[in-house]
């Protein structure tokens, strides 16, 4: 088993030392980390390249068109959808891991049959964790959101999910609210959902790259409401 961390980012330079350090510090070395610069307007790309220089466990992609988080994640994750031994794990550019055994926990869960898994997390301002177990016999579209951070899934599961699940009614990719837009169809198809009750993820609510949180949150709620009302698109 191997963990493929995927991180889209935009102007997230201020968090890169913590992010990259938290991945490098993993006790297990069964991982690679792919980071996608989604057209940053500062020197985030150059700074990141200097941090991971000569470390072939990291791959840095630079977009020439704006994709936003969801499409960046799906495009990269689909590279691995024909592989049975790959775990996709998502880290936002503003955030980081906070347990050096995270890769070990994930590999153990997937070796034991998980097809989706997520961990507890800690908000930077108050330590809050909203992740929790989701019963196997419930429809995730109709169940309270609980698979927040660290979100992971077996790469081959994505092959069963049409891109139509990730687009609005006009056929445009969602630009906000990617967490539920991505995870709900995967949870819907998942034969084994596992909640790892370990705090592995530090969530920075005071994002370094979001400048207009009111607008972002409104757009995010629109995506979430549409995704949940529509359900799984086969």
Image: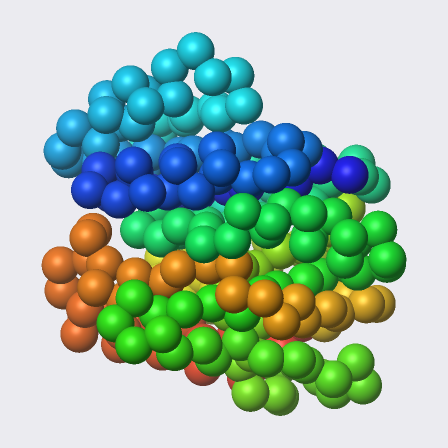
Q: Residue at x 35, y 29 (%)?
A: 63
Q: Is residue 94 above or below residue 24?
A: below
Residue 151 percent across, percent down from the top left: 56, 60
Q: Residue at x 66, y 80 (%)?
A: 133
Residue found at the very far top of the displayed protein = 54
Residue 156 lies left or right of residue 100; in this view the side is: right
Residue 58 lies left or right of residue 230; in this view the side is: left
Q: Nearer the viewer, residue 51 or 99?
A: 99
Q: Nearer the viewer, residue 46 or 212?
A: 46
Residue 135 lies left or right of residue 130; in this view the side is: right
Residue 185 percent across, percent down from the top left: 65, 67
Q: Residue at x 26, y 34 (%)?
A: 39
Residue 40 percent across, percent down from the top left: 22, 36
Quadrant holding the N terminus = top right
Q: Residue at x 48, y 24 (%)?
A: 59
Q: Is residue 105 above or below residue 28?
A: below
Q: Nearer the viewer, residue 6 or 218?
A: 6
Quadrant holding the C terminus = bottom right
Residue 182 visible, this angle = no
Residue 104 visible, this angle = yes
Q: Quadrant of residue 147?
A: bottom right
The mark tally for this picture is 0
Residue 99 percent across, percent down from the top left: 51, 53
């Amino acid at each position: 088993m191997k963990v493929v961390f995927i991180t889209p980012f935009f102007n997230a330079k201020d968090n890169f030392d913590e992010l990259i350090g938290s991945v490098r510090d993993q006790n297990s070395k069964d991982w690679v980390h792919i980071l996608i610069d989604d057209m940053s307007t500062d020197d985030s790309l150059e700074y990141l390249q200097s941090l991971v220089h000569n470390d072939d466990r990291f791959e840095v992609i630079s977009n020439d068109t704006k994709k936003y988080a969801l499409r960046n994640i799906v495009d990269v994750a689909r590279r691995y959808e024909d592989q049975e031994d790959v775990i996709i794990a998502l880290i936002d550019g503003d955030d980081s891991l906070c347990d050096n055994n995270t890769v070990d926990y994930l590999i153990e869960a997937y070796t034991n049959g998980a097809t989706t898994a997520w961990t507890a997390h800690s908000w930077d301002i108050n330590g809050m964790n909203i992740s929790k177990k989701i019963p196997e016999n419930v429809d995730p579209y109709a169940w309270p959101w609980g698979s927040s951070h660290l979100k992971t899934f077996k790469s081959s599961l994505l092959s069963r999910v049409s891109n139509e699940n990730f687009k609005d009614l006009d056929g445009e990719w969602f630009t906000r609210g990617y967490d539920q837009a991505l995870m709900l169809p995967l949870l819907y198809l998942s034969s084994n959902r596992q909640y790892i009750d370990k705090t592995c993820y530090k969530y920075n609510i005071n994002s370094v790259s979001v400048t207009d949180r009111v607008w972002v949150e409104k757009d995010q709620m629109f995506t979430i409401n549409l995704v949940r009302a529509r359900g799984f698109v086969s």
